[in-house]
Image: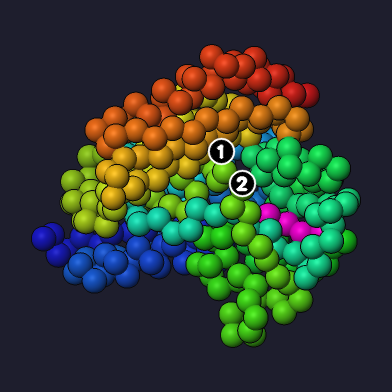
Amino acid sequence: MNSKKTIRIGTRESELALWQAHTVQKKLNDLGYKTEIIAVKSQGDLLLDKPLYELGITGIFTKTLDIAMLNGQVDIAVHSMKDVPTALPIGIVQAAVLERASTLDILVHKGNLDFLEGNGTIATGSLRRQAQWLNKYPNHKVVGLRGNVNTRMQKITESDWSGAVFAAAGLERIGLTPSPSPKERGAKPDLDYINLDWMIPAPAQGAMVIVAMGKDDFTLDAVSQLNDIETEICTYIERQFLKTLEGGCTAPIGALASYCELEDNFTFKGSLLSIDGKQKLEIEKIVPVEEWKKLGFNCANEILENGGTELMKTIKESLKK
């Protein structure tokens, strides 16, 4: 081992991003590698007043770290994989995908769910969550919500919203999931949550990815030891579905692949919705394990052939307005 080399871990400054970076740091340190964490501000953190999709979402949180890596300031970057564009910048490669946490979306609310039977206002910065929510609850209003996880949790208590949608994994990682004994967890005592098991998550939700420079053999060898093969394959399928459908455009796309050891097969669920949630195209497939490589691609093409091409055109037009 090149004992002189210190692996510099690039990260955003939010609590969740730092948690992810420290998790990777500990894993590398346990393997005997020297590491250093370098925090970099991203454009996505600075521009909190615009909805994500208005910022040309693809890569908004990863761009600054990509530049730092290409400039030689950091050796690796750790990301929530759902934030990472399906096409990485030239020279940067996916080095490892860590074992996945929960893929669930959850609704954080103020202890009263009566609004689910009537009118409500739900906050989210995600087009996918907005579309799926409006599809299920067409009488509800959806408003934008930006900022890091802590800021978004604070905004719920200060607003008149009925609730807000979060990724379960993000709240779990930094101990903000509302719980019966919130003081122990740092969560707000007046909040509660329910699992939205009907909502198809974002492709790669709950997974953390490490990227590195393609020519940095020392770092690639070190980081590859953290890779979880099952998570790598499932997120590959989901991101292939996303890439085939969207062609560089942001759209309300959900995707979830899972492996069943007993049957030795992969199950895939995917969805594409109109932004207002009125149109929904869904697909579900189970394939033998040897057919995983084209699973996302084939499912996306089936959606495109069954109304998806027209729906994607409509989405692209509405996002230009």
Which contiguous range is marked in magenta? 161-166
Q: Residue 250, position in %: x, y?
A: 61, 31
Assign a secondary structure to mark 2.
loop
What type is the residue that disc 1 sits on?
Gly
Mark number for residue 319? none
Q: Which residue is mark 1?
A: 254
Near-viewer residue (46 or 182) = 182
The residue under the point 61% across, 27% down is 281
> How packed is label 2: few (under 14 Cα within 10 Å), some, or many (20 or more)?
some
Say whether marks 1 and 2 touch (CB < 8 Å).
Answer: yes
Q: Residue 21, position in %: x, y?
A: 41, 62
The residue under the point 64% across, 39% down is 128
Q: Write down the quadrant of residue 313 in the picture.
A: top right
Q: Residue furthest left?
A: 1
Where the N terminus falls, by quadrant? bottom left
Label 1 – label 2 distance at C-alpha = 8 Å
Mark number for residue 199? 2
In this picture, residue 40 sits left or right of residue 55: left
Near-viewer residue (305 or 67) = 305
